[in-house]
Amino acid sequence: MLMPMALEWEQIIVDSSDPIALGQWWAEALGWVVVDKTEEIVEIRPEPDRLPGLLFVPVPEGKTAKNRLHPDFRPDDQEAEVARLIALGARRAEPAQEGQHWVTLFDPEGNEFCVLSEPRS
């Protein structure tokens, strides 16, 4: 029988044409802190010593396909959070999906994410 290995989720890597700007946008959108920043990358986390984080890096040379992953977020007030994120520079995916419990948005570089409504009872 194989022994389970300890596996800790460190971060998600986000390819970006402007990692610094996009990382700072997500830090503000999520209320997270920048824990590492160079001329090419920025890493953000919920708190300095709390994982997982997001690491924004330049798009690798020759990469043309989008990653098949997007985050979902569940705020206390979906409508207010969508309005706040749009004010920060996000934009709505069109067409809006009627009757769904989420709103699909794009960050400033066009990466898709969803803002969910409160949990159903």
Image (cartoon, grey):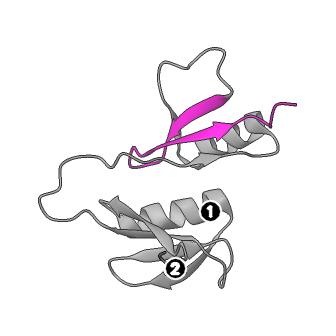
Looking at the image, which residue sits at the far front? 1
Label 2 sits on a secondary structure element that is loop
| Residue type at tag 2 | Met
In 3D space, how far apart are the residues under numbered discs 2 and 1 (Cα atoms)? Answer: 41 Å
**Badge 2: few (under 14), some or many (20 or more) residues near its Cα, within 10 Å?**
few
Magenta span contains residue 116: yes
Q: Position of residue 11 (x, y in %)?
A: 49, 71
Report the residue that reaches farthest toward the left: 62
Identify the residue under disc 2: 3
Q: Residue at x 64, y 21 (%)?
A: 100
Relative to residue 81, is residue 51 drawn left or right?
left
Pointer 2 or 1: first along the chain: 2
User: Height in image: 37 above or below 59?
Assistant: below
Residue drawn 53% across the image and 46% down it: 89
Q: Position of residue 105 (x, y in %)?
A: 53, 37
- Which residue does the image show at 34% across and 63% down from the upper left? 18
Query: Given the image, on which type of amino acid does mark 1 rest?
Result: Glu
Disc 2, disc 1: CB below 8 Å?
A: no
Q: Which residue is mark 1?
A: 28
Residue 35: % across, % down: 56, 83
Determine whether 59 is above or below 48 in the image. above
Q: Residue furthest right?
A: 121
Return the x and y of residue 25 as percentages of the image width and height: 53, 60
Which of discs 2 and 1 lies nearer the camera? The answer is 2
Q: What stretch of residues is rendered in magenta? A: 102-121
List the single residue furthest toward the top: 98
Quadrant of the frame with the C terminus: top right
> Is-magenta flag for residue 39?
no
